[in-house]
Amino acid sequence: MKDLAPVTADGGVLADSRSDIRAVQADIRLVGLQQQAERSKLKPEFGVRLDHMFGFGGLPMQYSLMGMVRLPMFGWSSRSAKANMASLQWKTESLKQEKEKMINEAEGMVYSLRQEIATRRRQLRVLQETVIPALQRNYQTMQLAYEQNTEELFNLYDAWETLNNTQLEYWDQVRQLLLMQVELDRTLEIK
């Protein structure tokens, strides 16, 4: 069984350790880059093109020089870029909300699992230190009484059955505790 003292569950640690939260963060960065690309479409573009052709049959070389200007400053030419930027802004906000939701869910799960693990450990300690030794002494007392012919076999069997069932319950509790620790490690993505 692991010690839970070094396990922290704040949002920063979860954002760094969980791959699903890192994926959402990468999506947010990608949307930011898409916004920059859309913003660059609102700037004027200038281009120059130079072509030449070989002349055949004694014709001279031919050259062509073209200049291009794209001015998206007018309302009708920049509407789609502005609409795309607005939609990307909403998408960014949506992804940020999703990231916060995932962090909150993970924090809640970690806190809940830590409390359940602490409770289960207390139950195991009580079973191990108090209940099982008392049942073992009861069984030994019944066994001694049966050997001296002062107790019946069925009472001895009941004491043994109670001890055995309690020990099985103890090991079932240990199994559940270990499964909770595995779930906590999975939630925190500890490898």
Image (tube, rainbow, N blue to C red):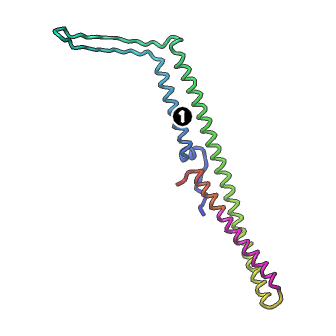
Q: How far across and down, in percent of the image, does residue 177 sit? A: 65, 61
Magenta span: chief secondary structure: helix
Q: Secondary structure at mark 1?
A: helix
The residue positioned 51% from the left and 30% from the top of the image is: 32
Q: How far across and down, in percent of the image, does residue 171 sit? A: 67, 68
Q: Is residue 122 left or right of residue 93?
A: right
On screen, 123 above or below 139?
above
Q: How far across and down, in percent of the image, does residue 130 sit? A: 73, 72
When asked about the image quadrant of residue 11, the answer is top right
On screen, 167 above or below 65?
below
Q: How far across and down, in percent of the image, does residue 97 sit? A: 62, 35
Q: Which residue is mark 1?
A: 28
Q: How many other residues sit within 10 Å of disc 1, few (<14), some (14-19) or many (≥20)?
A: many
Q: Nearer the viewer, residue 87 or 153?
A: 153
The residue positioned 66% from the left and 51% from the top of the image is: 111
Whether the magenta-drawn stretch holds residue 85 is answered as: no
Name the residue furthest top: 59
Q: Amino acid at mark 1?
A: Ile
Whether the magenta-drawn stretch holds residue 166 is answered as: yes
On screen, 46 above or below 114?
above
On screen, 25 above or below 67?
below
When asked about the image quadrant of residue 172, the answer is bottom right
The residue stretch that appears in magenta:
152-175
Q: Is residue 98 left or right of residue 34?
A: right
